[in-house]
Amino acid sequence: MTVKAVASVSAGAQNTFTSWLPVAAGRRASMSISGTWSGVVHFQRSFDGGATPLDVESFTANGERTYVAEEGSSIRLGIKTGNYTSGTALLRVGTQGN
C-alpha cells in the first residue's frame, strides 16, 4: 500500500488521539500500535469529520492492522478517558488518500 497521509502520536495519557484522517470508500488504511504501555487503544471512525466518533475496534497489545473503508469516513487511533493505565503507546494511522 502506498501511504498518502499519516497521523501519529505518542500516547502517554488518557484522551490522547492521532489526528483524524479522511479515507475514501474502498481505500485501505494501516494501523500500528507499539511501545511499552498498559491500557486500551481504540480505533474510531466518524462520518461527520470527527464530531461523532464511533468505536470500531479496541486493542490491549501492540500490533499492526489493515482496515478497508466500506464508505467514506475519517479514522483515528487513541486512548479514551478512563482507558489509560501506564507507559507510552506509539500510535500511527496511514491512508491511501482520497
Image: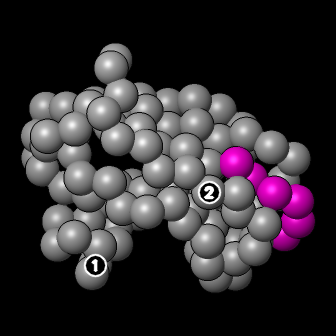
Q: Is residue 88 magenta?
A: yes
Which secondary structure, mark 2?
strand
For the view shown, which residue lies furthest in the top direction?
1
To which residue does mark 1 refer?
Answer: 52
Q: Earlier in the sequence, mark 1 or mark 2?
A: 2
Tell me if 5 is positioned left or right of 91 in this view: left
Q: Is residue 21 visible?
A: yes
Q: Which mark is residue 9?
A: 2
Please state which amino acid type lies under the numbered disc 2. Answer: Val
Place of residue 4 in the rendered image (x, y in percent of width and height, measured from the top left) = 30, 33
Q: Which SS class for mark 1? A: loop
Q: CA distance from mark 1 to mark 2?
A: 20 Å
**How many numbered markers are drawn?**
2
- Residue lying at 29% horizontally and 73% vertically, measured from the top left: 50
Q: Which x, y percent locates residue 48?
A: 17, 72
Q: Position of residue 33 (x, y in %)?
A: 65, 41
Give the answer, above or below, for where 9 lies relative to 30.
below
Q: Main secondary structure of the magenta part?
A: strand
Q: Is residue 3 above or below residue 45?
A: above
Instruction: Point out the frontmost of discs 1 and 2.
Output: 2
The verdict on residue 1 being magenta is: no
Image quadrant for the N terminus?
A: top left
Q: Which residues are magenta?
A: 85-90
Whole-percent x, y for residue 66 in the image: 41, 29
The reply, left or right, for residue 91 in relation to residue 87 is left
Specify the quadrant that holds the C terminus.
Answer: top left
**Where, by quadrant of the figure, is residue 13 drawn?**
bottom right
Q: Residues within 10 Å of mark 1 (few under 14, many from 20)?
A: few
Q: In the displayed orientation, state which residue is furthest to the front.
A: 4
Q: Is residue 18 left or right of residue 48?
A: right
Q: Around disc 2, counting alpha carbons within 10 Å, would you say few (fewer than 14), some (14 to 19), or many (20 or more)?
A: some
